[in-house]
Image (cartoon, helix red, strand yellow):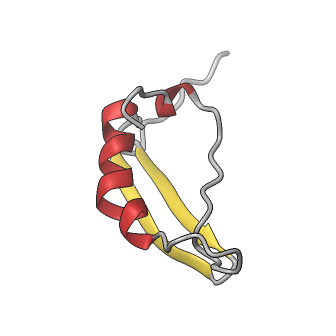
Amino acid sequence: MKLMAQNWGPRITAIPIICTEGMTDLGLHQGNVNGATFEDFVDEKLRLDLLPFDGINPRSVVIMGTGESLATLEL
């Protein structure tokens, strides 16, 4: 007998901003993240959290995964 997966509610996607100081912010989105949603996250949260690169700043470099949902020409 095959068991059906139970729907517990809406899908929530979390995109954290993590640095050597810990987690500084979190983007929560209902549903999957696409290119437009990720661009909004960058504009509204990530860009504001970054500091200018000076060689010692703990929040000046971004390391991202290569997920298809992050693919956008605007970034």
Q: Is residue 33 above or below residue 40?
A: above
Quadrant position of the C terminus in the picture: top left
Measuring from the top left, give residue 11's x and y in whole percent.
40, 42
Quadrant position of the N terminus in the picture: top right
Residue 10 in sight: no
Asked whether 9 or 71 is in front, the reply is 71
Measuring from the top left, give residue 74's x and y in whole percent.
36, 32
Q: What residue is drawn where x is 62% and y is 46%?
A: 64
Count of all numbered marks drawn on residues in the image: 0
Q: In this view, does 26 lie above or below 56?
A: above
Position of 48 with respect to 56 (left or right) is: left
Name, please, the residue furthest toward the top: 1
Q: Is residue 10 above or below residue 68?
A: below
Position of 51 with respect to 62 (left or right) is: left
Measuring from the top left, give residue 41's x and y in whole percent.
36, 52
Q: What residue is drawn where x is 35% and y is 42%?
A: 39
Residue 47 in sight: yes
Q: What residue is drawn where x is 48% and y is 69%?
A: 50
Q: In this view, does 54 lie above or below 11?
A: below
Asked whether 32 or 70 is in front, the reply is 70
Name, please, the residue furthest toward the bottom: 21
